[in-house]
Image (cartoon, rainbow, N blue to C red):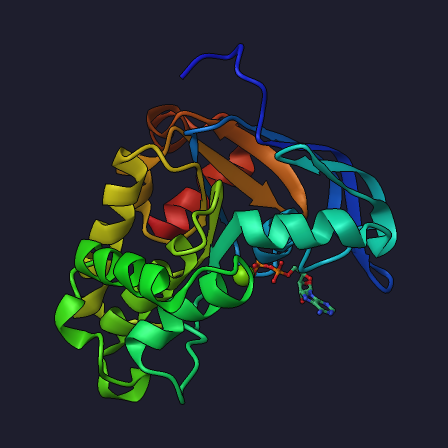
Amino acid sequence: MTSTQSPIVRMQQLNKHFGSLHVLNNIDLEIIPGEVVVVIGASGSGKSTLIRCINGLEEFQSGSLDVDGNELLPNGKSSKALQTIRTEVGMVFQQFNLFPHLSVRDNVTLAPMKVRGWSRQDAEETADKLLERVGISDQADKYPSQLSGGQQQRVALARALAMEPRLMLFDEPTSALDPEMIGEVLDAMRELAKEGMTMVIVTHEMGFAREVADRVIFIHQGEIAEQGPPEQLFDTPQHERTQSFLARVL
Ligand code: ADP
Ligand code: MG
């Protein structure tokens, strides 16, 4: 990782309001290719909104945002860039959002066939490789409701990877899982990080954050209150707000 690489995400002075609520306040954030950034902070601090802005799921009101050379404009005035970004940025949510009426394999092949125009054969070959990679190749013909939460979340990961994303966003991917299933999802994410995927991860799994993050960002009331390498942020937090947050969650 070198600082001379140009960022894949460049957010400058970004502001986001929900009505009178100022949810993101002058956010500056650059992410370089291959970087793993973990976002932490209290509930309601703006973590989800921040990452949802990156793939255009939320509009912002002012500032600038460039994702892999595609410029998203304030107030949603950028439909072309939005289309490109949606195909280049993968997202995994707390709720798995799988298509219930499709088999596991068809969940993974749908977008590459529809959006990328892949043949069924190519899409299925890729899907089977990805399902193997996340450790559920034996579940390909089942339906989501027949799988455990941990398995469903790994399907969601495979589905996002099928689009060959340049960047992956994760919004509390293990928060809806039973404790015994958290590890298998984190393992799959850990592998992805090792392979060099650029990742932005909102999580409360602080041990995981410490292990995989190149950088941890602490959000407080819509502002980046503090950021740094995990050892620095977790062991010697500089700001009182970071200290009191960590005292509550660690
Ligand atoms: P976090 O992910 O850190 O818990 P969010 O980004 O979800 O925080 O929310 C930040 C703030 O924005 C909260 O006060 C939340 O209630 C508010 N908010 C989030 N989504 C909406 C929405 N669609 N409409 C209005 N307010 C929202
Ligand atoms: Mg959230």
Coordinates of residue 227 in the picture (x, y in percent): 51, 29
Q: In the rendered view, tell whether residue 23 sits above or below residue 144.
A: above
Q: In the rendered view, tell whether residue 40 sits above or below residue 99.
A: above
Q: Nearer the viewer, residue 75 or 181?
A: 75
Q: In the rendered view, tell whether residue 175 sits above or below residue 147.
A: above
Q: Residue 96, located in which quarter of the rendered image? A: bottom left
Q: Residue 62, located in which quarter of the rendered image? A: top right
Q: Is residue 221 visible?
A: no
Coordinates of residue 209 in the picture (x, y in percent): 33, 41
Residue appearing at x 58%, y 50% in the figure:
51
Question: Which residue is the extreme one toward the left?
Answer: 138
Q: Is residue 198 left or right of residue 77?
A: left
Is the N terminus in the top left, top right, bottom left or bottom right quadrant?
Answer: top left
Q: Nearer the viewer, residue 193 or 222?
A: 193
Q: Residue 57, located in which quarter of the rendered image? A: bottom right
Coordinates of residue 76 in the picture (x, y in percent): 82, 55
Residue appearing at x 23%, y 62% in the figure:
128
